[in-house]
Amino acid sequence: MFTRKSLNPLSFDVWNYIALATLGVLTMYPFYYMIVASFSTGNSLLAHRGVLLWPVDPTFIAYEKVASNPKIVRGYLNSIYLVVAGVGLNMTITSLAAYALSRKHLVGRSFLLKFAVFTMIFDRGLIPLFLLVRNLGLYGSLWSVILTFAVNTYNLLIMVTFFRGVPESLEESAIVDGAGHFRILLEIFIPISKAVVATLILFYAVGRWNGYFYAMIFLPNPDRWPISLVLREIIISEQMSDYLSGVDVGDQGSVSETIKYATAVVTTLPILVLYPYLQKHFTKGVMLGSIKG
């Protein structure tokens, strides 16, 4: 990137805008290509070479097949359940733990924080985790995915750092008025931590929605699969027979190609809808959590 010492201010701004615009195009084009390809006719798409700027022989057949497939509907419902229940559990445990670890009078606080950081460096391992899930009777249940990731240490430390910056006078005043710790957390800490809370909700929601690996390990029943795992099976395993009913045998290969793009689009859409509502808190939340305390 150019510096103001090597260029005059106008040239510096022009070159930076050009560089950022180029980076933006390179970043966004793959997603734009996915959308455009999903609206294209399969045969025309396969025959097309080069950059794709608009749909080739536009059609909605891929979205019609995706919308009419029960696997997609079940996958969406499972993912919504994972996000709602999972994020609710994540934020509850993260908030409670962060409040406790941010209090100076907590006995063993330093040890607990070091232990939390230790889990970021040394992973538990997949086989011990699988054995634990199986022995607890959670194997095959959506709660096997929810409970095994009840808290993220990085998100916990962000909230701990922010809570440390809350003036102690607020807590002391609430205690004088007879408020307990739960009331202090719910009525004082959470309301003034909206930016951090919104940021962590976004982190947790994206992780829950996009996660497929542990669902693949713990959920053998396809009826329990989240939408991300359904998408993986479509793209990698080529399991397209349920999506091609009513399609001529000669056209199935081309239609299956556009169905992959359409499924990827509908899988990504909820996160794209959610992000604008939380985006205004995102940068502020991360910065506050990183500099306070």
Image (cartoon, grey):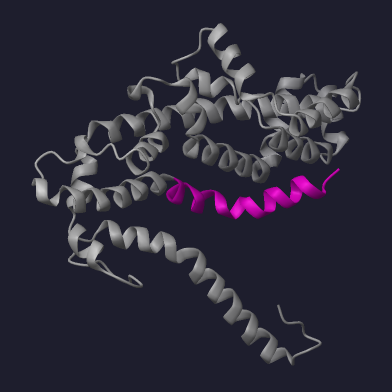
Residue 292 in magenta stretch: yes
As displayed, is residue 60 above or below residue 229?
below
As displayed, is residue 130 above or below residue 184?
above
Nearer to me, 279 or 209: 209
Q: Residue at x 46, y 46 (%)?
A: 271
Q: Residue at x 38, y 27 (%)?
A: 225
Q: Position of residue 22 (x, y in %)?
A: 54, 75
Q: Residue at x 67, y 91 (%)?
A: 11
As displayed, is residue 210 above or below residue 251?
above
Question: As drawn, is 127 to the left or to the right of 45?
Answer: right
Residues rendered magenta in the picture: 271-293
Q: Position of residue 94 (x, y in %)?
A: 68, 29
Residue 217 in magenta stretch: no
Q: How many marks?
A: 0
Q: Position of residue 44 (x, y in %)?
A: 20, 65
Question: As drawn, is 73 to the left or to the right of 254?
Answer: right
Question: As drawn, is 214 to the left or to the right of 236?
Answer: right
Location of the N terminus (image quadrant): bottom right
Name the main secondary structure of what is drawn in magenta: helix
Q: Position of residue 197 (x, y in %)?
A: 64, 39
Nearer to me, 267 or 166: 267
Nearer to me, 263 or 109: 263
